[in-house]
Amino acid sequence: MGGEDAVYWKERGFTEVNEGRVRLLVPDPRLYMRPDGQPEPAWAPVFYNPVMRDNRSLTVASILAYRGWRVRAFADPLAGACPRALRVLLEAGVSSAYAADIDPLAVSVCRANKLLNGVGSELIVERNDANSFMYRLDYEGIPMDAVDLDPYGSPVYYVQAASRLLAKRGLLIMTATDLGPLEGKYPSVALRRYGAVVGKTTFSKEMAARVLVAGVARLLTPFDRSVKPLLTLYERHYLKLVLEVEHSKGAATSTAGQMGLLCVDEKGMPRGHLPLEELTRSPRKAGGEGECWRSIGPLWLGPLWDVGHVERVLEAAKREGGVPFSGKAVKKLELMAEEARVSTPYYYRMDLVHAIAGKGEMEPPQAVVERLRSMGYRASRTHFDTRGIRTDASLQELLEALS
Ligand SMILES: C[S@@+](CC[C@H](N)C(=O)[O-])C[C@H]1O[C@@H](n2cnc3c(N)ncnc32)[C@H](O)[C@@H]1O
């Protein structure tokens, strides 16, 4: 059995962990500790980050929740130790999974994990570059219903190959950890990577998500692929998108129609938006109030969530024996289900709104949400920022609601 045997790996500094319904051989985290006492997965010979359990659970739950198409085939082109491919096989009812990693050691560990879970030909594992792997599967006519891109940094290098691989309609799931450029800290990187002009704003976490969706859409629409976000999650060190991608000229045209610019004032506070399509018509001021001191974008102005999808994910997370999530993740999903109902392309940071209003102490955001609702506005807190409120009230109306 050699390299596929658990004993072989344990003698080489690996340990066994449980995640969802799978058992995994992974590098023993105690061997890769940072000076602050926290494990550093990037130092281990094969990448496995226990902190990303909720991220992987979200892939499982999103496949279970997806109503567009039954997910039978799943691709995991940056697989590491294969936790995703194994979990979707054992927990999401997927019939076949295809995994690749460029690192030969990761591929060996993945094969050992396959054996450890009694998985046979349902999981094909190979050493390959992610793009070569996906283009080859496409060339061989093996369509996927879902692809999960989990790279180091940005997923944009892989999205075109992934979209080619998807059937007529499917799920493109991705994680991005390059939050610096996406949130506006490195504008020149954001411009070349995502084609967007970004800058400092008071809603940078949501701006990051909208720049990422737009960057993906810009790469897919030339190939008649549409992009529809079903779920968007911002976590401390990453953004996760679950997108439905469809091969259709009409749908791709409506995707392009959801791109636009956001206007911000000197403080980076949102002041309105302008769909790009408007630029092809008569010259117009951006929708919303006030002057556009600076434009951000192009970015995605459409919804970041599909309410039904988020509710089904939440239901899978709460169901007895359902997909395991941390309590913190369930709370975020609950918040998301609420904010998904208020479709504005930004949120207001209430500490800053209070400062503009000259109010010393910040009122709890939930109290402001309830007041706005009683005044007839749509309003919700946002999972992006504990101080944030998403509402269709303008900044002026929000200031009035405070007084
Ligand atoms: C963030 S880790 C993936 C972790 C894994 N998906 C998980 O959930 O534990 C990124 C993986 O991509 C692999 N990788 C990096 N560049 C690659 C490439 N061009 N093609 C395929 N795999 C690559 C790395 O070896 C690493 O295992």
Image: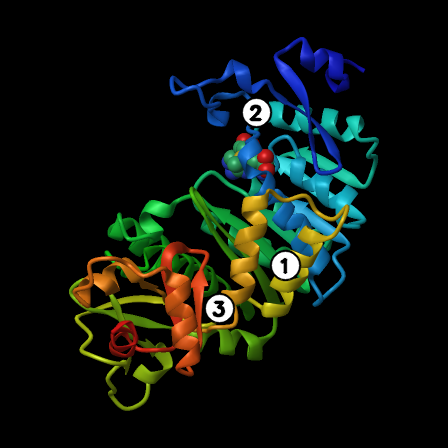
Q: Return the residue at label 3.
A: 222
Residue 161 visible in the current orientation: no
Name the mark nearer the viewer: 3 or 1: 1
Q: Secondary structure at mark 3?
A: helix
In the image, the residue with mark 2 has its CB under 8 Å from the nearest atom of ligand 1 = yes
Where residue 400 appears, as percent x and y from the top left, is 26, 77
Which image quadrant for residue 13? top right
Marks 1 and 2 sit apart, C-alpha to C-alpha, by: 26 Å
Whether residue 18 is situated above or below residue 202 in the rendered picture: above
Identify the residue at image location x=55%, y=68%: 228
Residue 319 or residue 169, whichever sits in front: 319
Instruction: Name the amino acid, label 1.
Output: Leu
Whether residue 281 is situated above or below residue 161 in the rendered picture: below
Which image quadrant for residue 202? bottom left
Residue 223 or residue 186, whichever sits in front: 186
Instruction: Name the amino acid, label 3.
Output: Pro
For marks 3 and 2, the one nearer the N-term is 2
**Label 2 Cα crowd, 10 Å radius (few <14 / some 14-19 / many 20+):** many
